[in-house]
Image: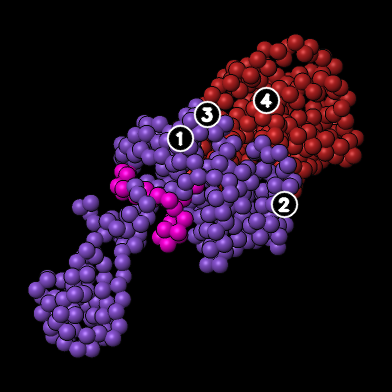
Amino acid sequence: MKLHRLWGLFLRYYYNLLRSYDRLTDMFFWPVVDLLMWGLTSQYLVKTGALNNNIVLALLGGIILWIFPWRGQYEITVSLLEDLWNRNLVNLFATPVKFIEWITTLMLIGIIKAAVSFAFASMVAILLYQTNIYTLGLKLLPWAGLLIVFGWVFGLLVSGIILRYGTKIQTLAWTAIHLISPFVGVYYSISTLPAWAQRVAAYVPASYVFEAMRSEIAGNPVPLSALLAPFLLCVFYLVIALYLLIRSYDHILKRGLISVE
Amino acid sequence: MPILEVKNLTKTFKSTPIIKGISFDVAEGEILGILGPNGAGKTTTLQMLLGILTPTSGSISIFGKDVATNKSNILESVNFSSTYVDMPWRLSVKENLTWSSYLYMIPDRKKRLKQIMELFRLEKIWNLPVAALSAGQKTRVNLARSMVNYPRLLLLDEPTASLDPEVASYMREFFARQREAYNKSIILTSHNMSEVEELCDRVLILKDGLVFDVDTPANLAKKIEDCYLSLRLTKNASKLDELIRRRKLVITVNEGITRIEIKEKMLPLFLYELTKLNIQYSEISIDKPNLEDYFMKVAKDKSL
């Protein structure tokens, strides 16, 4: 991998972001919409006595942490789509750029955008609901790390599917990560799921982070070492997703990059 | 030593052979034109040269290295431009050239970008988004982008399509100068035969996925034996009819001009006969075959 090429690719997406008000606003828009909706709902429930402040923090914390897998996936898949819409894949890969450099850039941009969205959403939560996710401390960092890798897994898988089958299934670029969200338990404990769904959730690394966050808020901190197994599982998924994406890329090279556009 | 060597290259899509074992090479400083009817496999070949389409079999070596295993390294010194490939349309010309430039190792990037801006006369559109450009301006920016890394080998897919005649002519001169000054090799596909004749040292004719012919434009044109003799007859026209019948030639008459299709080597004798028969004319012109005639013959003739 060459740094100057990563920088060139970064500039390409950075310039595009500056000139795309839709991409710029969706970094802030959806987290704020979710926060407004869930924040107001939970405030209402607090007033009726149905919720306490810890549950509000768990709900809003769930919304804010969900930004990481969402952005991790979204950045990879929507950037791929933009290159397809722009008929720019040929321009990209008829250069010294390696496929892995392109993927790496998209992953890194996902981290930056997720961090910006996270910072913004957490500030909104503080300002509107006096709910401070930073009280959870430095554990937020490894949690965020695992969640973003989880997002990448979906981003890579969906990109592989789009590369193979083209833009006719582009809806997946925006929605794929939400298909797994019932098993992640963003807003509720995994124990509320039916038994079969709990078994599925056991293989969903992100579910451990949200469980750990709720435990932490309830005053029962979960040691970081408990996240090691789900993290390794996530890395395992990442390797498989990367392998499948590279297989898809090799497959479209047999058809020609122009054909996928 | 050739800068590019293609050996027995084939490409099959879903059991349909598109390229059926072609071999050719390009020398340093040479401009090779690839011509062929639509569907002959020109773009497919260019894609394989760039490593964005995997060949079914055969080998491509550029600068003595195999493209299949050294793609990234090779493409540091290769670039391409195609009217069929777009750039990110929200980005300005300057932004597009800037990010593209970082994909290559370029010593003085700022200076190079300024140079490119001047060479391709991009000053007025430098800060405009690509979406706001005309088709011709986009082509010019695409060509500019293809020069950013000082390529030793340049692949141009219809480089002057959609350019106005003045800019197209400037571009042709530009590429000819680039070859002379820096010994660049260029492979170009074009439907503009006069452009190919003007620029190319050799022309490779692709037909049905096979190399039909490779030669200089002049030699290819010479393979057409027939030329056209046009006369405005003033005396003894009936004797000409007799001569035409005897020689079994084809003529057409349009607005007083008699056009005779005749083998080029027969022309001196035919002109001598006209004089001998006292067939007089006030105007004469001889249209010798050119590359376009050859191309048309190749494209039309199904038996070839």
Kind of residue at disc 2: Lys
What span is colored magenta in the figure? B186-213
| Label at residue A149 | 4
- Labels 2 and 1 in the same subunit: yes
Measured Cα–Cα span from mark 2 to mark 4: 41 Å
- Labels 3 and 4 in the same subunit: no
Does residue A98 appear left or right of residue B246 in this picture? right
Which type of secondary structure does the marked residue at label 4 adopt?
helix
User: In the image, residue B244 lies at what x, y percent?
Assistant: 14, 75
| Label at residue B114 | 2
Is label 3 in contact with label 4 (beta carbons under 8 Å)?
A: no
According to the picture, the residue beneath numbered tag 1 turns out to be: B1
Measured Cα–Cα span from mark 2 to mark 3: 31 Å
Above-or-below relation of A152 to A17: above
User: In the image, residue A198 lies at what x, y percent?
Assistant: 62, 19
Q: Report in which chain the residue with disc 2 lies.
A: B
Does residue B202 appear left or right of residue B207 in this picture? right
Kind of residue at disc 1: Met
Q: Residue at the spot x=84%, y=26% of the render? A: A54
Kind of residue at disc 4: Val
User: In the image, residue B12 lies at what x, y percent?
Assistant: 34, 37
Measured Cα–Cα span from mark 2 to mark 1: 34 Å
Residues packed near mark 3 inside 10 Å, few (<14), some (14 to 19) or many (20 plus): some
Give chain A's shade: red
